[in-house]
Image (cartoon, rainbow, N blue to C red):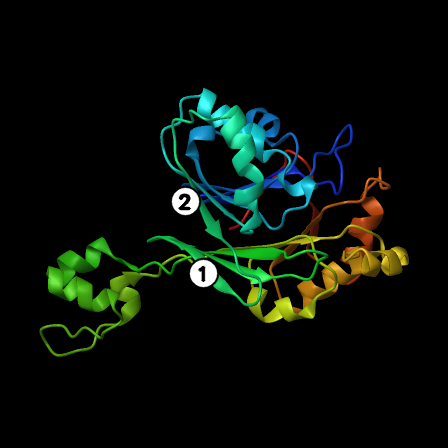
């Protein structure tokens, strides 16, 4: 089964610290490498984690606050210096084109690759990328400016035919296609063959949801229901819930409540306030509500089975 994992390039909110960079992640799914947000220092973290720049073809930006985009211009410039020639697609707020154009014209007028901008919308969920193996859906969050979350889902795979069944029942191509489509198969004596004799069930399609930045926003629950791994911002401890509300952020307790009510497999909390040197209390607070919690730590890779 192909790898499905998220590598945390940055987990801090607002600004970089000596040991935590601002938000950026690499999601690896079905041999695709998706960059989610691009805070300051992203390209340094990509190098540190030995991630091949040339494999990144899509960048998803949740919103246009600096701690989520200040690494973008430098990364684009580096792509050019490395001789990239494949198109780069950036999924972001429509304002990004206006903001980037003067910088690109001044610093990168001879880029050897095309940049395509896919404008996000913020009033409803929408599929913004799809290929034969993966779909990516954006959905509204609730922050001080227009902000999207992203839901990455593998497409359902077909079951595999058991090799021994092919020889035992002398299955032809038409039989195999029919069986994979869920139709019953009858042997030469007219007996319906148990599906367990014929197929190896396909592995479960996996999913990942990214939710940062947002206040406590229960409208996302139907969208992220049952995802295998949920990344949700947990900027503050719950004792600062008033500050979280006024700044349109979330507490660890609130993030865990979302995870519990959405019945997700695992919760990954991040976007930590710089006031927290020790992140243990944030994990403990979330774990009191939802058992399966991990901290999103810079340079850690989290696998989805």
How many marks do you count on the picture? Answer: 2
Residue sitting at x 77%, y 45%: 272
Query: Residue 274 appears in which quarter of the rendering?
Result: top right
Residue sitting at x 75%, y 43%: 13
Q: How far across and down, in percent of the image, does residue 49 sit? A: 57, 28
Q: How far across and down, in percent of the image, does residue 246 sit? A: 83, 59
Question: On the rendered structure, is 235 left or right of 267?
Answer: right
- The local crowd at label 2, few if under 14, some if 14 to 19, many if 20 or more residues have their Cα within 10 Å, is few
Q: How far across and down, in percent of the image, does residue 66 sit? A: 68, 40
Relative to 225, residue 60 above or below: above
Residue sitting at x 42%, y 24%: 110
Question: On the rendered structure, is 43 left or right of 153?
Answer: right
Task: Indicate which disc, 2 or 1, sits on the residue closer to the N terminus.
Answer: 2
- The local crowd at label 1, few if under 14, some if 14 to 19, many if 20 or more residues have their Cα within 10 Å, is few
Marking on residue 219: none
Q: Tag 2's secondary structure?
A: loop
Residue 105 visible: yes
Residue sitting at x 62%, y 40%: 69
Q: How far across and down, in percent of the image, does residue 208 sit? A: 54, 54
- The furthest residue to the bottom: 190
Instruction: Compare residues 96 and 173 and report the one nearer the observer.
Output: 96
Instruction: Compare residues 219 and 1 and report the one nearer the observer.
Output: 219
Q: Which residue is mark 1?
A: 127
């Amino acid at each position: 089964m192909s790898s499905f994992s998220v590598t945390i390039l940055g987990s801090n909110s607002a600004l970089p610290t000596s040991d935590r960079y601002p938000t950026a992640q690499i999601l690896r799914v079905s041999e695709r490498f998706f960059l989610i947000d691009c805070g300051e220092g992203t390209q340094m973290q990509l190098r540190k984690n030995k991630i091949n720049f040339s494999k990144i073809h899509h960048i998803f930006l949740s919103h246009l606050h600096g701690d989520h985009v200040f690494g973008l211009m430098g990364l684009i410039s580096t792509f050019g210096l490395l001789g990239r020639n494949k198109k780069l697609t950036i999924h972001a707020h429509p304002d990004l084109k206006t903001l980037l154009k003067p910088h690109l014209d001044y610093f990168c007028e001879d880029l050897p690759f095309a940049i395509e901008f896919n404008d996000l919308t913020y009033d409803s969920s929408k599929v913004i990328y799809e290929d034969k193996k993966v779909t990516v859906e954006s959905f509204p969050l609730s922050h001080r400016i227009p902000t999207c979350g992203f839901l990455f889902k593998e497409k359902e795979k077909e079951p595999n035919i058991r090799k021994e069944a092919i020889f035992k029942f002398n299955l032809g191509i038409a039989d195999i296609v029919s069986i994979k489509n869920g139709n019953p198969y009858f042997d030469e004596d007219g007996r319906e063959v148990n599906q367990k004799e014929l197929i190896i069930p396909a592995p479960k399609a996996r999913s990942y949801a990214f939710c940062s930045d947002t206040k406590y926003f229960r409208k996302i629950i139907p969208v992220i229901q049952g995802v295998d791994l949920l990344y949700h911002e947990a900027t503050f401890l719950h004792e600062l819930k008033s500050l979280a509300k006024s700044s349109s952020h979330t507490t660890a307790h609130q993030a865990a409540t979302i995870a519990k009510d959405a019945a997700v497999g695992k919760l990954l909390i991040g976007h930590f306030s710089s006031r927290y040197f020790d992140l243990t209390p944030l994990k403990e607070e979330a774990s009191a509500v939802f058992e399966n919690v991990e901290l999103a730590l810079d340079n850690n890779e989290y696998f989805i089975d």
